[in-house]
Amino acid sequence: MMLWISKPDATCLMLNTHWRTFRGLGPNQDVPDGWRCGIHDDDVAATVEAFRQAHVSRTPFTAEYRVHCSDGQYRWVHDHGAPWLDAEGRFMGLMGCCVDITEQRTHHWTVANAERRLKTLVENSRDVVYRVRLVPRLAFEYVGGAVETMTGYTPDELYKDVSLALNCIHPEDISKLALTPRAAAQLETTVTYRWLHKDGRTLWAEHYRMPVFDAGGQVVGLEGIARDVTARIEGERQLRESEVQLRQLAARLQTAREEERAEVSRELHDELGQTLTALKIEIGRAVAAFASQPTSVTTVDRLQSIVGLVDLGIATVKRISARLRPATLDHLGLAEAIRSEAATFKARTGIRCQLNATREESRLSAEQRTALFRIFQEALNNVVCHAGASSVRVAITETDEGVVLRVRDNGRGITAAQAAAPGSIGLLGMKERAALVGGTFTISGQRGKGTVVMVHVPIVPSPAVNQSGGQAEPRIG
């Protein structure tokens, strides 16, 4: 404690050691400038005047001011003195003490500055910051920020009439509010709902909310931040619509491609194939005619060679026709088409391919059967290009709910990174084919234990397929 005593004329009578040490003075050292000693230039006039007036009026003296300390820094002190009287009641001066309050003062200033900065930040924010009292009645304790921009109402208007804020909530979203302590205690931290602006516009606002508790732990209010996310919501809506339109367009393109393939396949098989067959027959007759008459062996050999070339052309037409659109898929069903493709795959690559099907006849639509068959073809292509497998097992399982196609190889196994790589166009195509017919596609693998491709397609026609089994016309716009 820094103690001091003054005389009736306000001159110094006594200064204790702590007072002197605080100001950097020795025990017997003269005090320069008297009571002004060490006081900050900005504080000295007001402090000395208050000290003088206390002596004139013989009343207590109180002041807070900065003092230059022995460490070279200025520190805040609280100085308080009270009149002291002799036995006959005569005024003898003031007796007082100084207390270092730098820490308290600094903390107070820090808190005050932080509050000012926070208020400035809130008022200039693009968000709405609010605190709502729920009991004993609904009212705003605070609302600020971009409230006028987002609602059309000023904070003062909302303070006066909280119902204005309730009228800003879209009627279909009122249920998302938490206007009772019980509801506030169970609220979702983050919620998005629509606001109706005073000018008639509809805005989407994302709220981050927290309940406010009293000293007894009871919910008494809500506080939160609301942000205008209209642009984001609208962008997401447009993106979803675009995705739907793109899927419909892709579905239509897939159907058109399959129809074109079927048409080309029929023309190759029915027209070019028949022409080549007729040509082979005629050449065969010519060979027989030449063989029955004396002629050169070279001529007969050339004719036989032509027959061989025609056979090769017929086989090529059949192979191209089958690749474009296997006739078995349309006439014998999905299981038989996959069985035939598996046999061709084994003959071409030497990789064993076994099929197990629970039903030969499927209730899938034509588009769904085609999608599964094309996914199967792409899976076999991946086995040849990437798996390094020696065998493939294929299972088609049909239940009342849907059909599951599972293709498992014993190759090196795909990794999660490979499956998710942006350049995996084949996998993306399989996934998209499955989605277009309402199905799901998954692929997984283990190093050294192979890869499993699995597709599930529901029996119920997908949204992209109409009730008659044909592709629905895309609705654009």
Image: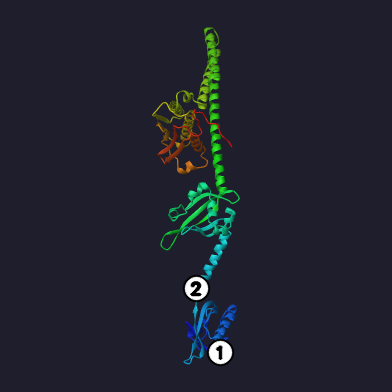
Most extreme residue toward the top is 293
Q: Residue at x 55, y 88 (%)?
A: 11
Q: x%, y% of residue 194?
A: 54, 49
Helix, strand or loop for disc 2: helix
Please, is residue 47 above or below residue 476 in the view?
below
Which residue bears the numbered disc 2? 104
Please, is residue 45 above or below residue 188 in the view?
below
Q: x%, y% of residue 85?
A: 49, 89
Q: Which residue is nearer to you in this view: 77 or 164? A: 164
Task: Report the disc number at residue 9.
Answer: 1
- Indicate the quadrant containing the C terminus: top left, top right, bottom left or bottom right: top right
Q: Residues within 10 Å of mark 1 (few under 14, many from 20)?
A: few
Q: Which residue is nearer to you in this view: 430 or 106? A: 106
Q: Tell whether label 1 touches label 2 (CB within 8 Å).
A: no
Q: Is residue 353 left or right of residue 258?
A: left
Most extreme residue toward the bottom is 88
Q: Residue at x 54, y 63 (%)?
A: 118
Determine the CA span between mark 2 and mark 1: 33 Å
Q: Looking at the image, tell me whether mark 2 or mark 1 is earlier in sequence order.
A: 1
Helix, strand or loop for disc 1: loop
Q: x%, y% of residue 300?
A: 54, 13
Please, is residue 103 above or below residue 144 in the view?
below
Q: Nearer the viewer, mark 2 or mark 1?
A: 1
Amino acid type shown at disc 2: Gln
Q: Which residue is nearer to you in this view: 323 or 260? A: 260
Q: Residue at x 45, y 32 (%)?
A: 460
Amino acid type shown at disc 1: Asp
Q: x%, y% of residue 21?
A: 50, 83
Query: Is residue 49 in view?
Result: yes
